[in-house]
Image: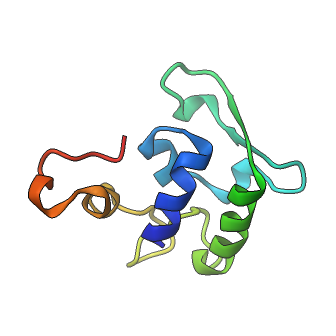
Amino acid sequence: MTALALKLAPLVFVRPSELRYAEWSEFDLPNAEWRIPAARMKMGELHSVPLSRQALAILNELKPLARGGRYLFPSLRTREASLRQTRSSRATAPAAQAPRAAAH
């Protein structure tokens, strides 16, 4: 699941927390659009993200992995929580730079 998050991130170009807390209800797959609610955005405004064919393919791959939960990237322990920040941060950090690297 972390690998799919890392593949999706550069295609949607949003902050790591916006991706980690993305909910399936925010996605309009037939119209290839992700509408992030204002409450989750830094500037407090609704943000619409167009989805490429590649992003849609990743989302279709994610759907069965979400186990019917609300988050695109559910916690490994429970589908009612999102993927933890440390999991995505560790995945992007080279071993020599682990404390300094970040997904953004």
Front-most of 69 and 30?
Answer: 30
Where is residue 53 drawn, in percent x and y?
78, 56
Task: Give the side of residue 52 with respect to residue 89, left or right.
Answer: right
Q: Residue at x 52, y 67 (%)?
A: 4
In the figure, 96 relative to 66: above or below?
Answer: above
Whether residue 74 appears in this view of the structure is no
In the figure, 25 relative to 67: above or below?
Answer: above
Q: Quadrant of the C terminus?
A: top left
Front-most of 44 and 47?
Answer: 47
Front-most of 48 and 23?
Answer: 48
Where is residue 42 drawn, in percent x and y?
48, 25
Q: Residue at x 61, y 48 (%)?
A: 11
Toward which corner of the image does residue 102 lie, by quadrant?
A: top left
Q: Residue furthest right?
A: 30
Where is residue 66 drawn, in percent x and y?
59, 74
Toward which corner of the image does residue 57 lie, by quadrant?
A: bottom right
